[in-house]
Amino acid sequence: MINVLFAAGDANWADYQLHLAAAFERQGLVVNLQTSLAPDQTDYIIYAPSSRLLDFAPYTRCKAVLSLWAGVEKIVTNTSLTQPLCRMVDPGLTQGMVEWVTGHAFRYHLGIDANLEAQDGKWIRSVPPLASQRSVTVLGLGALGAACATSLARLGFQVTGWSRRPKQIKGVTCHAGPDGLTKALRSAEILVLLLPNTAETTNTLNADTLAALPEGAFILNPGRGTLIDDDALISALDSGQVAHATLDVFREEPLPKTHPYWAHPKVTVTPHIAAETRPGTASEVIAENIRRGESGEPFLHLVDRANGY
């Protein structure tokens, strides 16, 4: 019997209980899944920041902490957490992100907003370029960034990607490091932010990097609110350096009603819906990692503590 503690909040328990049980059964795992277990009896912890669990030190038997969230910034710095930590890379979450990014990229590419605003009875034809004539840059080439970059490249866009360390993705021009960031930004007619939230990525978009973009660039941020210096972005929108920004994530959520983004004519706010962990597919990822732990195989999506993701 494998004892698994579900330390992810009451609301998540209602969503996940049956999905996890079914996933464990499909893996042939005999699991005792509980919302309360003695630390010395716990083999694995399924975790979300909504949990009241803060001290992992007593869980000396625990083989891994399995996060239900893709972002682990709220747990990775916990000094009591010495067990292996796995972040969530969920096929449903990935597909949702690809659909959000692709949809909004095409919205900008085709000029859909401008066409809607121009419906005043005047027959003015404005033909958009083909995707092959449009440059899109994706900052962050992890699982989500790579999936979005690949999808956009398959649709014909000229796609550039940037990451801290060198990567290779078919159909994508990849840059890395500080010099590579400037190169990636210079071609970004549409810029997609999918970097993790770390000290190194805070304010990646600031006055200097925004100035490196082509004039009239469009910005999509489904990554992390901390990636953008909000004041610098508003200034760039006001000057025309940035034509429009669609933002799904913010430093404070829900976004306060008084925040200038709500009223800005060049900002579209979406309420953190670009990608959501789906209980059905996420449960399969959790079950597979427990199977791996029991078989002595490497865990999937193991967090690098030094890098924070």
Image: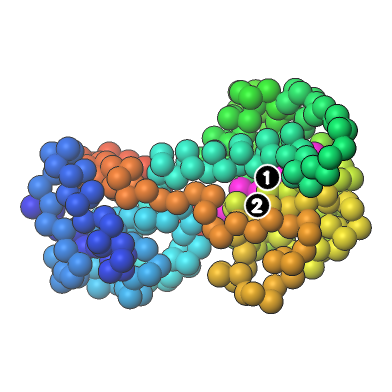
What type is the residue that disc 2 sits on?
Asn
Q: Are marks 2 and 1 in contact (CB under 8 Å)?
A: yes
Q: Is 192 part of what is drawn in magenta?
A: yes
The amino acid pointed to by label 1 is Val
Residue 262 percent across, percent down from the top left: 70, 66
Left/right placement of residue 193 relative to residue 53 reads right
- Which residue corresponds to the image point at 87% horizontal and 37% vertical from the top-left? 122
Residue hosting label 2: 221
Q: Earlier in the sequence, mark 2 or mark 1?
A: 1
Residue 160 visible in the displayed image: no
The residue closer to the viewer here, 258 or 67, is 258
Q: How crowded is mark 2: few (under 14 residues within 10 Å), some or many (20 or more)?
A: many
Q: Which mark is residue 170?
A: none
Nearest the viewer among 100 and 52 is: 100
- Magenta-tinted stretch: 189-196
Q: Residue at the spot x=8%, y=52% of the render?
A: 1
Residue named by callout 1: 192
Q: How is the image coloured?
A: rainbow
> How far is disc 2 from disc 1 in space, using C-alphas?
6 Å
Q: What element carries label 1?
A: strand
Task: Evaluate whether residue 257 shows in this view.
Answer: yes
Residue at the image position 62 percent from the left and 74 percent from the top = 256
Q: Does the magenta stretch include residue 258?
A: no
Disc 2 element = strand
Q: Which residue is drawn at 33% across and 43% down?
A: 281
Pinpoint residue 114: horizontal percent, then vertical percent.
Answer: 79, 43
Placement of 94 over or under 228, stated as above or below? above
Above or below, comparing residue 197 to residue 152 in the picture: below
Considering depth in this image, is 154 or 49 the residue closer to the camera? 154
Residue 72 placement, left or right of 293: right
Q: Residue 99 placed where, x, y %?
A: 54, 38
Q: In the image, residue 78 lies at what x, y percent?
A: 43, 70
